[in-house]
Image (cartoon, rainbow, N blue to C red):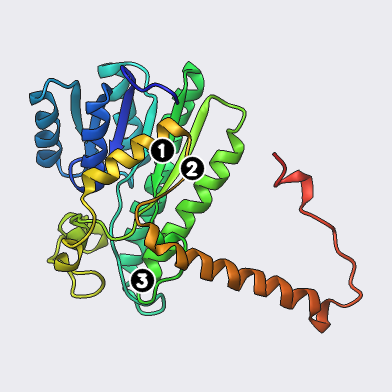
Amino acid sequence: MKDVKGKTAFITGGASGMGLGMARAFAEAGMKVMVADIEAEAAKRAAAELTGKGHEAAWVQVDVTSLDAMKAAAQKTVDTFGNVHVLCNNAGIGVFGHSETCDMRNWHWVVDVNLWGVVHGLQAFVPLMLAHGEPSHVSSTASMAGMAGLRGAGPYNATKFAVVGIMETFAAEHRKDNISASVLCPGLVATNIASSTRNRQDKYGGAAKASDKGISAAELAKGLNPDAVGREVLEAILEDQFYIFTDPSLRHIVETRSKRILQGYDWAANCKSLKGEKQADGLPGGLLTK
């Protein structure tokens, strides 16, 4: 997208943290913004902040774990502002612990929010974007935990790796459409993700105080200002930048993982088990072709 002025953006998790940073940046750029969040009062306050500054904004309460709720939010956005041009699948929660010992209700919770929330966003909004055919963009929030396995964060890592994969696939599938894409992989940002359990639904165990596992609120407070992330996401949309990293100093994490992957190929090229075996020389059906 080369111009966003007058266009409409829908942001999940838009009432706080990086989502609110995006809402502020988009509104300042002249966009109409729908703030979507599971916390109704927070979403209402965020929208009021924007309209109080003369911007066009509205809010909707939505639980991203429900496809029906996302479709209803999409319809409300269209009814309020018309065509939607930017979708930010930003809602996310932090569930930490080892994969084999993390409570299964928390496993289901983090997958339903961080993974299914993105899928539901795509299902609810992308058909609308394809139908109106105007330049559009989809951005989904992953994490540096989607670039490398971080110790003690099995469930969180799993969902964030999945989001990176989904968006890489989405970008490839829509390369010839009028829809661009990006995946946000932030480092430490000053959000309230440490207290995610304040919004945990009853079916996952109900609301609870912040866990002492994972990143603490004090550690998060030292992170990047979420408004800077919002401005960066806007810049990436305008410049068609797919991978959005917020902390260039973490480049070594990706470099280390890439070296390990390439070492795996070097090992496979010389391992005894594959000697003399016939290979298909590629994936079926041109799956990776442009």
Task: Report the number of numbered marks.
Answer: 3
Cβ–Cβ below 8 Å for labels 1 and 2?
A: yes
Q: Which residue is mark 2?
A: 242
What x and y, as percent, mark residue 92? Answer: 30, 52
Where residue 125 appears, x then y in whole percent?
41, 30
Disc 1 or disc 3, which is closer to the eye? 1
> Which circle's residue, 1 or 2, is located before the other in the chain?
1
Residue for point 59% across, 70% down: 259
Which quadrant holds residue 152?
A: bottom left
The image position of residue 162, as x and y in percent, is 48, 56
**Residue for point 80% across, 79% down:** 270
Q: Tell me the tag on residue 89.
A: none
In the picture, which quadrant includes the N terminus? top left
Determine the residue positioned at 45% across, 41% down. Answer: 182
Residue pointed to by mark 1: 236
Q: Which residue is mark 3?
A: 153
Up-down relation of residue 258 to residue 117 (above or below): below
Res 220 quadrant in image: bottom left
